[in-house]
Amino acid sequence: MKRMLEVALGIVTGIGGFLEAGSLATAAQAGSEFRFDLIWAVIVGAVCLAFLVEMAGRLSAISKHTIPDALRERFGIRFFVVSLIIMELVMFLVMATELGGVAIALELASGVSYRWWALPVGFLAWILLWKGTFGLIEKGVSVLGLVTLAFVVGAIHLHPPMADVVRGALPRPPAHDPARYWFLAVSILGASISPYLFAFYSAGAVEDKWDVSHLTINRITAGLGMGFGGIVAIGALIVAAIVFHPLDIQVDSFMQLPLLLTGAFGRVGFVLFVASLGIACFGAAQEIALTAAYMLAQGLGWRWSENLPPAVDARFSLSYTVLIPLAAIPAAAGVDILKLTNISMVLSAASLPVIVAPLLILMNDRRYVRDYGNGWFSNTVVALITALAFVLAIVSFPLLVKGGG
Amino acid sequence: MLLVLDVLDKQLTDRHGVRMGKADGLVMLQEGDAPPRVVCIEVGSLTLARRLGRHVGRWAARLARRWGGDRTQSYRIPWTLVRGITLEIAVDVDAEETRVNVVEDWLRIHVVAHIPGGRL
Amino acid sequence: MRRRTLTRLAAGALALAACGGPTPQKAAKARDRAASTATSAGLVADAWDSGAAPGIYASDALARMAASFAKDSAAPVWSALPRPTRDPVLHELGILRVTAAALDSAVRRRDRSTVQSLRGALADHGRALTAIEIDTLP
């Protein structure tokens, strides 16, 4: 019975945790500008994510060490510091995006500018981390995040032409504006395969005291959870393709996005959209704040756990205490949140190699994974993902310049 | 045993299995013609900073002198107290009785305790 | 070897960033974006009219869209166009800005009939903007 509950929770985590400001905005942009043509990018992203998350969970369940731990222990302090700096910068940008997303949701609901909401939102995120426990945050985010299923219901409700949807699931050369097409493809991949997620997930496995007996749950969470999560993002893409594409509407502001659901569901759709955006971004902001602190604490050997009172792991708790208000500054200063989203998603994609490439080695290091290392299939997949990660890292900057506008 | 691969940067655990930082550095001693041997493991951010480069090390040392005084000196664990090396290095000390958590303690008393909910 | 590749990549990125002056192609894209904002503003007005969108959101969104038309009008990108094209574009953008602002205040007054008539005007001028031909051939 307890196991069933855990499996259910795992799936819920995947669904509720997949959508955030980045995947929502990039899916809406892709649907409005290229109709169903970029569905394949969401699928590739979700599949890569499922494999990598499974490995992150397995690594930590078997070794009781997290990814940041392993980056330091296995590859030494210099490699760790380089990856720490890159990851913290990217996480800072993504956290700023997510806090901005929550602030926008509050503006949609209240009419008061998002700039005024950024710091209160940051404060709320902080107080929940300061007072809450890992289980509370993980379960709360996941269960509330189920509201994002509204996009799937919306997509079905709008009766998409299935033949076109299926055709979109296969990669194809762009019909027009190739720079923009590939820019959005990279953004979608960056939003799906968020680097922070692996570090978060592996810390979660240690926080929840996983061991060998959790490997099945780990596989189910990763596979089904991320799979269903990807379906939510595809739902958002399909809705945008049906509602916005025929009208030649391009998504260049979050203010347009409630229109995705008002057509199908009226006022209920508006409320569902605001709730989805607010909850999904808030959950992501909390996970990133925790991960930013985990990464520092685990790599540098501090005490860490979201389940300890802040007085016991002072350095860990103070890390997120300092980071959250800093990350609220861009939104409070009135930065365009959609532009920030696009930039941070591309940089997420660019930072992938520092966390994906080491997994290839760690998942074959018997000191960490003992007899539970990767088979040839997983190794092939992770090698392919690593190659993809390097390609993304190289093409991301030119695309940001050429296709970002 | 490979010192760099098996010891350096590894997680340290104390007598009670509690995590107590990483092996930030090693102190080696060479006497006469004998091959150098490890005398102790160092734990501390100054040691870590030195390994990142001479400039980082000097800068960290200057900062430490100004703000931290003696407390920030790295803590040394004699090699004779090492009990086992797996993924972690088990050492026969009690983390509570060492200086590895001085910064943690300082922050708890001077910062965290002043934030609501920050007391034990 | 690796350093040279990196240098080339950096140079390429810089070159891309440097060719940032206004061009007719960019002007055409900016026109399409403004037309897209006009269509979105129309949808917002419709959503309010049908009761799907609350007045608070509709008014806020329309005010932001009016501000975006104002920003578009002042954008340097139009300098790439010859006067006979540029003037009508700026003219339509001006009308769109005024219309969106008027829609915002009509929503705030809960003046349904004004919203409906302005919404028609918005659609007309959005179409007029799209209809302006921009010669994108070099």
Image (spheres, coloured by chain):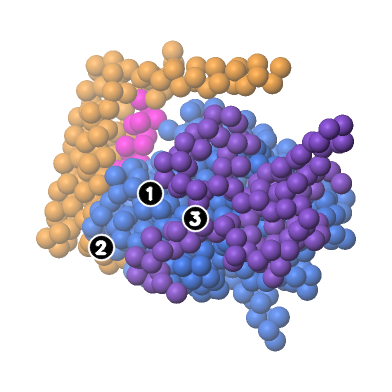
Color of chain A here? blue
- The quadrant of the picture occupied by the C terminus of chain B is bottom left
Protein chain holding label 3 = B
Residue A395, above or below A220: above
Q: In the depicted view, which residue is nearer to us: A162 or A393?
A: A393
Q: Amino acid at mark 3?
A: Val
Q: Secondary structure at mark 3?
A: helix
The colour chain B appears in is purple
Q: Which residues are magenta?
A: C27-41
* Residue sitting nearer the eye, A374 or C21: A374
Picture residue at 87% right of the left edge, 31% below the top: B33
Q: Are marks 2 and 3 in contact (CB under 8 Å)?
A: no
Q: Which residue is mark 3?
A: B103
Q: How many C-alpha atoms fall within 10 Å of the one at disc 1: few (<14), some, or many (≥20)?
A: some
| Mark 2 crowdedness (10 Å alpha carbons): few <14, some 14-19, many ≥20 | some
Query: Which amino acid does the dot numbered 1 rest on?
Result: Leu
- Cα separation, mark 1 vs mark 2, equals 24 Å
Identify the residue under disc 1. A326
- Both on one chain, marks 1 and 3? no
Query: For residue C36, what is the image quadrant?
Result: top left
Between tags 2 and 3, which lies in front? Answer: 3
Residue closest to the far front: B32
- Name the residue that disc number 2 marks: A110
Chain C on-screen colour: orange
Residue B78 at x, y percent in the picture: 72, 53
Q: CA distance from mark 1 to mark 3?
A: 23 Å
Could you tell me which secondary element the residue under label 2 belongs to?
A: helix
